[in-house]
Every structure is written in structure tokens, then in C-alpha cells.
Amino acid sequence: MDTTGYEWVPARLELPAFPLVVPKTLAAKARTVERPEQNLQISGASTVSTSLATALQGRERALKRWQHLARRADVSALIRQLSDHPELIAVAAVREKVSQIVRSGRWNAPRGRPAGRYRWHPLIVRGLVVACINGDPAMTPERAFHRLAEWNFLSYDAAKKLYYQAFDEERFRAVVWESGNPACRAPEDEARSLAAVEQLERGESIRRQVDAPVIGRIDLSFTADL
């Protein structure tokens, strides 16, 4: 049977990322800086690994949680949910609910962030642990927690808690959102032109250089390791 066209669904993929800290700078910063977390050298960022199926599940979980809280009329929990998943605002039903609550004067989100809440963000700690492991082949996450404590970055218990928090919490997982536009049908000739765009295949990498106005040239590497 000949193919006459393809159906396309516009979508957006949200991928949390953690910094790639330069390993050799960790110990040096711990020795020379009173609060080393204020001055860390990074070489880039790495996104969390995911698959389309996993990202779709993340979307469904976030939406179901929002719908559950909306039915309960739990405004405080809705505010926290939107803080953890700001991408929810792209959903029309979420925008409508937020608008209703704001108009009623009940959307009282706290100004700023609670003191100390993100002195160490879980994704930052994940990046620190990865840097320790990359700098020592014998290093494990548990040993990295001890190493960070020895270097006076943060305590062993705090490092362990925040590191695993970056894996366990929903807000640090990938989600995919459909744009809200209906699926469209693309003729075969248009599909061929889209297929000609460089595609990232499993186990391969695409590398590019871009010039940023503030920090200069940046090397980008996109790798599919699923």
C-alpha cells in the first residue's frame, strides 16, 4: 500500500537538567572559599534520560494530580503543584482554573522562596555527585556524599537526601506536552522534507557550537543514550 501522507501532533518536551561541574575545581573551592557553593565552575549541563513513553506518563501524572486538587478546591496545594510543574500553565483547563482563583482573590502565592529552601537545589547536588564520580573511577554515590561533607560543601545526610530527591520527585522528571493544536496531516512531500532534517538516533551524538552574547562560544552536544 502506498503512503499518501503522515499525521503530525505538535508537542513540547520538558527535560530537567543538572550542571556538569568541573571535578578538579571541587576540592580547590572547598579549601579556598568560605561558602564554596557560591562559586563553582561548570563545563555544561546534562539533561535527565527519558523516553517518549516515560515523558507521556509524567504528563498524565501531573495533570491527574492537578485535577484531583482542583476537585478538592485545595488552593494552597494547587499553588505548590504549579510551582513544581510550571509547564502545566500551557494547558487551557489549568489556565482557566488559575484565572478563576486569581479573580476570586484566593491565589496568594508566597513572595520569593522560603529561606534556605534551595540553598542546595537537588539538581545541583546531583551535578556535584556526578563530578565526584567522574573525577575518581572508584567513587560511588555514597562515597561522594562523604567526600562533599569532608570538603565542607554540605553534610552527608543533606547530600544523600537531595541527590535522591532529584531522582524521586515528579518535578525533576521529563514530561511531554501536546501544543493544544489538533493533529494535522502532512502530504508525503512535506514529510520527506521534515525527514531530511538531521535526526538524533540512539547511541549517536550531534555537536554544535553557538556564540552566546554574554559568555561567548558554547559547545553543545546532544546524545541519545536511551
Image: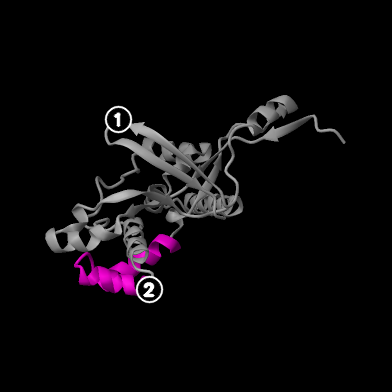
Which residue lies at the image location 32% right of the left edge and 56% below the top edge?
124
Left of 12 or right of it: where is 124? left
Question: Visible in this render: residue 134?
Answer: yes
As for residue 158 lying within the magenta part, the answer is yes
Q: Which residues are magenta?
A: 141-168
Q: Work out whether mark 2 precedes mark 1 in sequence or the reverse, and give the earlier one.
A: 2
Left of 121 or right of it: where is 188? right
Question: Visible in this render: residue 34?
Answer: no
Badge 2: few (under 14), some or many (20 or more) residues near its Cα, within 10 Å?
few
Question: Mark 2 — residue?
Answer: 138
> Callout 1, which amino acid?
Pro
Question: Mark 1 — residue?
Answer: 213
Quadrant position of residue 35: bottom left
Q: Is residue 215 above or below residue 126?
A: above
> Callout 2, which amino acid?
Ala
Q: Is residue 199 above or below residue 170?
A: above
Badge 1: few (under 14), some or many (20 or more) residues near its Cα, within 10 Å?
few
Q: Nearer the viewer, residue 71 or 195?
A: 195
